[in-house]
Image: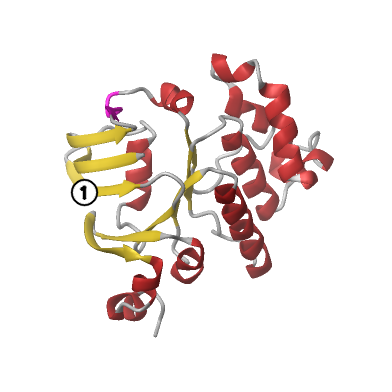
């Protein structure tokens, strides 16, 4: 479904991603693992068109999208939930969710799609007229995911969905991720909580200082000595 081929990504003249390649197969949950500053978020921004690789290619269903505008990527079936949620705090919950349907082809189905979001997140229906800035962390994450689902994604990219959440809410969010995947949405997950990421993932890649250093199935990763020492504290 998605292939990243030998990309180099820069911030001005600082190279942050070095010759990175990986792939995401349809129907899978794939995790990008690594410490802060490893380049995980930069990789998602490159896929979603917020950044462009200086070298290499981003292939979506056998077509290059590395020069596609971010505003057009969503219509291809790729939705990105950024780190920190990035909601509009003075807008209502429903207004924030509707922002995910701004693209013309999505706008006509917005009423049907938001009903689907409310079925997944009944609490958001209760909060729909409340300002997003007054929500709890878990509720904000629900709004951010709901906004992304308005794009009817085939691939949902989630950047640190557990960040700042209490353990019981982390469990709820990852149960939801698993459920969305079972409904046919492929997931690309960036998550520092390696243990919980590997519990739901089919495959994982480890990035360190912008380079791929390790990859394997979730089962293989759990048994890997480097993963145990560096990320699981074992």
Instruction: Tell me the residue at 30%/47% (across/down).
Output: 23
The magenta segment is 63-67
- Place residue 148 in its image quadrant: top right
Q: Outermost residue toward the bottom?
A: 234
Q: Position of residue 224 (x, y in %)?
A: 31, 77
Q: How crowded is mark 1: few (under 14 residues within 10 Å), some or many (20 or more)?
A: some
Residue highlighted by disc 1? 20
Q: Where is residue 149 in the image (x, y as percent from the top left)?
A: 59, 36
Q: Would you say residue 73 sits in the magenta stretch?
A: no
Q: What element carries label 1?
A: strand
216 relative to 186 in the view: left or right: left
37 relative to 157 in the view: left or right: left
Q: Is residue 73 visible?
A: yes
Q: Image quadrant for the N terminus?
A: top left
Query: 60 and 39: which one is in front?
Result: 60
**Colour scheme used in the picture?**
secondary structure
Q: Position of residue 223 (x, y in %)?
A: 35, 79
111 relative to 33 in the view: left or right: right
Instruction: Tell me the residue at 29%/81% (across/down).
Output: 225
Q: Is residue 106 above or below residue 59?
A: above
């Amino acid at each position: 479904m998605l292939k990243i081929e030998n990309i180099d990504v820069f911030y001005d003249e600082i190279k942050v991603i070095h010759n990175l390649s990986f792939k995401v197969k349809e129907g899978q949950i794939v995790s990008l693992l690594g410490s802060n500053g490893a380049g995980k978020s930069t990789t998602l921004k490159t896929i979603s068109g917020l950044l462009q690789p200086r070298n290499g290619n981003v292939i979506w269903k056998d077509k290059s999208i590395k020069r596609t505008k971010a505003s057009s990527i969503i219509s291809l079936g790729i939705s990105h939930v950024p780190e920190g949620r990035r909601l509009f705090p003075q807008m209502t919950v429903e207004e924030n969710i509707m922002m995910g349907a701004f693209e013309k082809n999505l706008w006509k189905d917005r009423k049907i799609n938001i009903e689907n979001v409310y079925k997944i997140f009944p609490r958001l229906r209760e909060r729909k007229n409340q300002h997003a800035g007054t929500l709890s962390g878990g509720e904000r994450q629900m709004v951010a995911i709901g906004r992304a689902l308005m794009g009817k994604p085939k691939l949902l990219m989630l950047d640190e969905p557990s960040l700042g959440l209490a353990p019981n809410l982390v469990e709820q969010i990852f149960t939801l991720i698993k459920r969305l995947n079972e409904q046919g949405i492929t997931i690309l997950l960036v998550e520092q909580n390696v243990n919980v990421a590997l519990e739901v993932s089919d495959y994982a890649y480890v990035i360190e200082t912008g380079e791929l250093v390790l990859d394997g199935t979730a089962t293989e990763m759990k048994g890997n000595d480097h993963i145990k020492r560096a990320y699981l504290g074992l």
